[in-house]
Image (cartoon, rainbow, N blue to C red):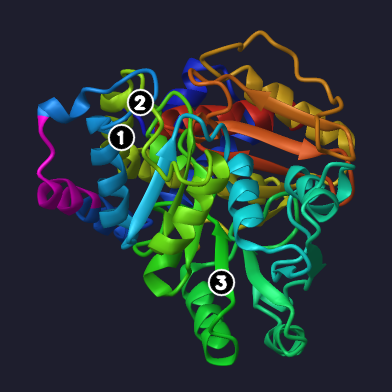
């Protein structure tokens, strides 16, 4: 048989310069090593073996969810994988943004300050923190400040030191992924250096990390290198395409306890929260997640190489070390953004006949175009793209649970862009 790209081009009638660029792109990435993903698979397997997962652990509960066996086992597995004292993974946390906002509100006191050290958060989160009329700064009486990242996504340590010197900061917030910002994602090593820097100067300040899109991409998590808490979605990386909904926080026990009290009620702790029969889906999804992420990063490397061959700037570069499952492609104008999204949509197994159009999305200041056709609604691990219609007109390609599926999506998008 011909190579994979030749086969896909023949099957889907992709020819001419797109085919030629695709073949060159495939040659550039076909020998890339994915050693990090091999180690992550071993780490997750070790966690399952050490935990002693039993078939009976899949049983869940309804109602209040007291003594839910599946929830307890799943959260224990997360603790092993993240190296944390306590985890809270619940269906009642409906998204990564929800997990983050609950964590922030639980760990920043009225009259004290939350400091973002990765600049402006993505639109919906910043809206929840300070822009909306019901934002945290208005309803909880907290202060909020931002420090932009320095060159190459490095932390502005001088600026952070000045802010810490003011003595009013309760929590530092790190957004690991790029969101809708034209900057690289932040790696675990850099987060570790930040945590050590903060610990030395202000040990009472907690470091909270938005871990969305970054879980299991690197061999270590932010909590392995000093972060006090990580927050994220269960239908992205960790869900492995099985988890139907949910979000999580994991970290130091006392900090997770604060989040549980805010999520439920003081005095109830984390005793509530039924898994509603989805225990097997969560646990199986976690086990398969490293394989899905490996497939994803392989597909994103090809997409990066293909669009670079077509003359577009991409970040990360094909074959570069990845710290999340997002690929930025600078298309340069809104027309190309629309054509990219429409081309990708045609390759998705669900809603392939939909035609993406830009529109208003709650929490976003600019119209956004999205391409999505997931078996689990909003599960961007499955292959999707989205982009706000604003300069510099970057599109953000995410996920791709089967490498060949991601290849096809990139080919369809490239053909549409031209």
In the picture of the structure, the residue carrying the numbered disc 1 is 71
Residues shaded magenta: 44-54
| Mark 1 Cα-neighbour bin, 10 Å: few <14, some 14–19, many ≥20 | many
Q: Find residue 34 and report its image quarter.
A: bottom left
| Mark 3 Cα-neighbour bin, 10 Å: few <14, some 14–19, many ≥20 | many
Residue at x 88% of width, y 36% of height: 334
Q: Is residue 305 above or below residue 209?
A: above
Q: Find residue 22 and report its image quarter.
A: top right
Upstream in sequence: badge 2 or badge 1: 1
Q: Is residue 353 above or below residue 302?
A: above
For marks 1 and 3, give the CA distance. 26 Å
Name the side, left or right, on which 205 lies relative to 395.
left
In the picture of the structure, the residue carrying the numbered disc 2 is 275
Tag 2 near tag 1, CB within 8 Å: yes
Name the side, left or right, on which 135 lies relative to 52.
right
| Residue 51 falls within the magenta-colored stretch | yes
Q: SS at mark 3?
A: strand
For the residue pair 94 and 341, the one nearer the viewer reads as 94
Residue at x 52% of width, y 67% of height: 187
For marks 2 and 1, give the CA distance. 6 Å
In the picture of the structure, the residue carrying the numbered disc 3 is 206
Q: Can you see residue 135?
A: yes
Upstream in sequence: badge 3 or badge 2: 3
For the residue pair 330 and 267, the one nearer the viewer reads as 267
């Amino acid at each position: 048989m011909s190579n994979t790209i030749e086969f896909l081009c023949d099957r889907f009638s992709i020819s001419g310069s797109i085919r030629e660029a695709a073949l060159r792109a495939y040659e550039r990435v076909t020998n890339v090593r994915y050693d990090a993903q091999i180690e992550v698979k071993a780490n997750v397997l070790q966690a399952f073996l050490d935990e002693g997962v039993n078939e009976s652990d899949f049983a869940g509960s309804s109602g209040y969810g007291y003594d839910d066996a599946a929830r307890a086992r799943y959260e224990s597995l997360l603790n092993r994988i993240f190296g944390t004292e306590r985890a809270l993974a619940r269906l009642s946390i409906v998204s990564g943004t929800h997990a983050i906002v609950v964590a922030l509100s639980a760990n920043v006191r009225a009259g004290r300050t939350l400091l973002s050290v990765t600049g402006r958060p993505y639109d919906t989160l910043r809206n929840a923190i300070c822009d909306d009329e019901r934002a945290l700064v208005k309803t909880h009486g907290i202060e909020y400040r931002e420090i932009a990242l320095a060159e190459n996504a490095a932390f502005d340590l001088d600026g952070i030191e000045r802010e810490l010197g003011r003595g009013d900061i309760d929590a530092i917030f790190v957004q690991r992924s790029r969101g809708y910002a034209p900057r690289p994602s932040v790696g675990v090593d850099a987060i570790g250096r930040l945590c050590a820097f903060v610990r030395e100067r202000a040990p009472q300040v907690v470091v909270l990390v938005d871990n969305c899109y970054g879980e299991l991409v690197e061999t270590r998590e932010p909590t392995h290198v000093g972060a006090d808490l990580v927050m994220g979605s269960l239908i992205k990386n960790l869900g492995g395409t099985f988890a139907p909904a949910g979000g999580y926080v994991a970290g130091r026990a006392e900090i997770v306890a604060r989040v549980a009290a805010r999520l439920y009620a003081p005095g109830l702790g984390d005793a509530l929260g039924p898994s509603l029969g989805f225990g097997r889906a969560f646990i199986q999804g976690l086990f398969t997640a490293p394989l899905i992420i490996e497939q994803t990063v392989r597909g994103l490397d090809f997409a990066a190489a293909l669009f670079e061959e077509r003359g577009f700037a991409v970040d990360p570069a094909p074959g570069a070390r990845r710290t999340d499952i997002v690929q930025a492609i600078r298309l340069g104008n809104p027309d190309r953004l629309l054509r990219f999204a429409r081309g990708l949509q045609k390759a998705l197994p669900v809603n392939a006949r939909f035609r993406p159009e830009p529109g208003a999305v709650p929490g976003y200041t600019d119209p956004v175009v999205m391409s999505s056709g997931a078996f689990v609604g909003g599960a961007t691990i499955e292959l999707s793209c989205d982009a706000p219609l604003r300069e510099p007109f970057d599109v953000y390609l995410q996920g791709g649970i089967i490498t060949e599926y991601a290849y096809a999506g990139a080919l369809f998008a490239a053909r549409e862009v031209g």
